[in-house]
Amino acid sequence: MQVTVENVSELGRKMTITVENANIEQAVEQRLASIRPSVRMAGFRPGKVPMKMLARTHGPAARREVIDQLVQDSMREAFTQENVNPASPPHIDSMKEEDAALIYTLNYEIFPELETVKLDGITLEKTVAEVTDEDVDKMLDTLREQRMTWEPLKRAAKEEDGVTIDFVGTIDGEEFQGGKGQDVMVVIGNNSMLPEFEQQLVGVKAGQELTVTMTFPDDYRAEHLRGKKADFAVVVKQVAKKKLPKLDAAFAELCGVEGGLAALKKEVRANMERELAGALKNVNKRRAMDSVATNNDIALPTAPIEREAHHLMEQAKNNLRNQGVKVEGLPFEISSFKDNAEKRVKLSLLIGKIISDNKIEPEEKRVREAIDAIAASYEDPEDVVNYYMTNQDKLAEIQMMVVEDTVVEWIYDHVTVEEKASSFSEVMNSVA
């Protein structure tokens, strides 16, 4: 077998393969002989169909199968011989039979050969933060808000009070779609209703009836109501204020923690520190990866980018489906995913180069620490640990995560680093 390779572009290659003594005719005859016992044809017993007739009816298909197999075998051998790992599925450009030989050409792309990953000149910001007592107190306030109740009042409503109402809206004396509600609680100032509506509830009392008059904004989501003036007949059924639970042992038990308020604070802090550690890792990882991608200009094969763009588009569709959105008919354009796909393909090559050059492997200790960190937030951590340790796919995900973490650490070790102090809330908001 003879193989020649021609460069047609920076990453494009044209390979010509000559299979000498291909023996196609002999292989076709053998193929026909192998299927002869199972071929049924009117006027002949099974296995007795004449070979000439068999060649006329089944010969073309047998020839295609023989050539397909010959191409697959020779192509695989040629790629091994030339040490080729194509970045795209090879496309056969031409094929001919010449005497006893089969000659064909194919086009494909290769991945770029990276000599090194360039990190010179990179100054990388590294965000650092810690959980403070104030952060814990704010989180406890959030937990209290989540478990608050509403205490009915006799006084008039004011900002932040909850007013439960029935209402019927009309425009020019006619009721309109979406303008009616029963037992609707409006928290004044929360903007769950339009501000103009909410502000007219300030000062109302339980049992009061009133008319709220307002004009819908010109950019209101319901097009048929934009700019329209509406009257709402409102019946106030209750005015109530927020009642937050006390921070005590009973509240700790309400949150599922035994041991009183001190134990609750300890668990809240531990959870916040785990969340912060994960968020910091993601923030700094993204920054490191972005810098490496920007600092390395490399040619990229088109086929992997196309595949990744399609993957990202399908991922976006599935995310919407999971939110109950019908994606059929939505204007998804593959071009809108190309930039992100190109960046991911580039990073995949750069990360792979760093891993291979530095022989980075997932350390068993770090893999177990990562699994323990995930399991810590569950009710029965040991079950979670066993699940990851016995599920090869899940274990491989953690191992890859540990390898990527090691790559990020390697990047920070080889660039100029400037630490930037941040707060818990700033970090968490940046990854929300």
Image: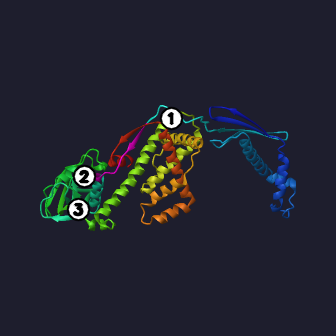
Q: Is residue 319 left or right of residue 305?
A: left
Q: Is residue 130 magenta?
A: yes
**Amino acid at the residue labelled 2:** Asn
Q: Name which of mark 1 and mark 3 comes first in the sequence.
A: 1
**Amino acid at the residue labelled 1:** Leu
User: In the rendered image, which residue does mark 1 sit on?
Assistant: 119
| Gap between marks 1 and 3 measured at Cα | 53 Å
Q: Quadrant of residue 85?
A: top right
Task: Decide: few, some or many residues near mark 1? Use Cα within 10 Å; few <14, some 14-19, many ≥20.
Answer: some
Task: Decide: few, some or many residues near mark 3? Use Cα within 10 Å; few <14, some 14-19, many ≥20.
Answer: some
**Amino acid at the residue labelled 3:** Leu
Looking at the picture, does residue 231 appear above or below residue 243? above
Range covered by the magenta-colored residues = 124-134
Seen from the viewer's position, the closer of residues 69 and 143 is 143
- Kindly check if marks 1 and 2 are in contact, taking CB atoms under 8 A apart as contact: no
In the picture, the disc for residue 191 is 2
Q: Residue at x 37, y 40 (%)?
A: 420
Q: Name which of mark 1 and mark 2 comes first in the sequence.
A: 1
Looking at the picture, does residue 93 appear above or below residue 38? above
User: In the rendered image, which residue does mark 3 sit on?
Assistant: 244
SS at badge 3 = loop
In the picture, the disc for residue 367 is none
Question: How far across and down, in percent of the image, does residue 255 sit?
Answer: 32, 65
Q: Is residue 221 magenta?
A: no
Question: How far across and down, in percent of the image, does residue 46 sit?
Answer: 84, 64
Q: Name which of mark 3 and mark 2 comes first in the sequence.
A: 2
Question: How far across and down, in percent of the image, does residue 204 sit?
Answer: 13, 58
Seen from the viewer's position, the closer of residues 391 and 12 is 391
Q: Is residue 89 left or right of residue 377?
A: right
- Kindly check if marks 3 and 2 are in contact, taking CB atoms under 8 A apart as contact: no
